[in-house]
Amino acid sequence: MSNILTFPNVSVGFDPTSRPCGFGALAECVLRHRHPKHNAYWLKENAEILNVLASIPSCVSGPVRTDVLGVYQQTYADLFEELKFFPQYYRFYLSMLLDLEKLGFEGDLGQKAVEFVVAHNLVETELSDLQRAEGARLIARRGIHGWQDDLVARLIRFAARSETFAVPNKKACYELTHIVFYLTDYGRVPFILADDVELSLIFSGLFAFLDEDADLLAEVCLSLMFIGKDVPEIWQHWLRAQRLQFQVEYGTAPSQIDAYHTFLMVEWDALSSGAEEPVLDLRPAPMQFFAPRKHANLITHVSLYLLNLSGKRTGNWDRDRSHIFDRLTPMGTALLEQAILSTPHFEAFYEGFARADVSSESVLLGGMGGADV
């Protein structure tokens, strides 16, 4: 069992005696060295890192604040004009402005940007409920109510349908975590959600844990924190082990999508739950990030086994467990045992995961689904 929880304490550039914070260096890397300015990935990554830092109290009030403000000095002054020229990307620009002011920039560009977004009704340019929710959250940060009752009702209805999240579907799981992010403003605003939403998050977390998906699991853990619910200790332990295994390559900007987003989500979760600053040596230079490899491929193995059972699937964990364990590698066995121990809701999760009441033609195999939104 310990072989999925204990990893060698090694990563490129990691010095256990110094453990530099490095967020200022990471911000400069994202701002200047990973993607060309105004590229969609540049917008996404800069908005993400500022959002993360503005959501961690120790970063808002600590030395990270000074480092980050120095990095974005000129960028802050330009963002409002760029928002007006690129209104289709208003969510990225508005998010950056508001978070920079949260981190300490003195100015009224965030207020002006919110007024511009409202005056041009940019939230109504969104077809997706999730993107409308993000727009509503952003303008609400300056006291303008943008939440429509029917929008909130649709989001909660989706989030509370727990059976959706017992079937492997990464896109749905990411949408769930972002619904919680936006309704709670990343934990800043108390928002009472039904117990079914907590169960949806637990099911999503079980899928992420079994799939060894640190990115999604970190978002699920953060979502549980933001609604004031306990996070399974086994999940957090696994994420801490994953955190020590990230590697970074210096001097080369990513030619394709790397593991930066996963790294950032794992760091966010760790810092939000009391861990210390990043363990990687983060530098103000081009960096590519590499996540630990997966070991068990458990979701695919179990899904294919259940698919081949066709009409013989029961959805009863007590009946099926021995047959499933007999077909797993030692690594897969250890991972599944940890998943079972992590939450009392595993049997309910398995009942939906097995899809015993549907035909074999409609079974979705593990790993299907979209990317992060």
Image (spheres, rainbow, N blue to C red):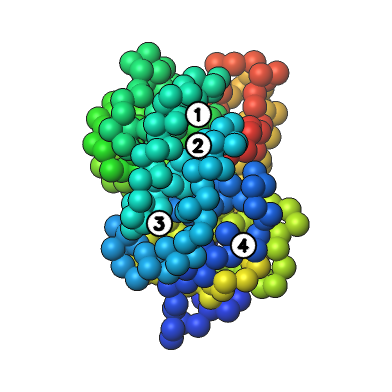
Identified by mark 4, the residue type is Arg
Quickly name the residue at label 1: 131
Q: Position of residue 256 (x, y in %)?
A: 73, 53
Quarter of image, res 157:
top left
Q: Residue at coordinates 70% horizontally, 72% vertically from top-left? A: 251
Q: Position of residue 46 (x, y in %)?
A: 54, 52
Quickly name the residue at label 3: 53
Residue 55 visible (yes or no): no
Mark 2 in CB contact with mark 1 (< 8 angstroms): yes
Vertical arrangement, residue 79 with respect to residue 254, above or below: above
Question: Which numbered disc, 2 or 1, marks the residue closer to the eye?
Answer: 2
Disc 2, SS? helix
Task: Please rate how many residues cluster around mark 2, counting C-alpha atoms within 10 Å: few if below 14, some from 14 to 19, many from 20.
Answer: many
> For residue 32, which numbered disc appears in the image?
4
Vertical arrangement, residue 367 with respect to residue 337, above or below: above
Q: Position of residue 74 (x, y in %)?
A: 51, 59
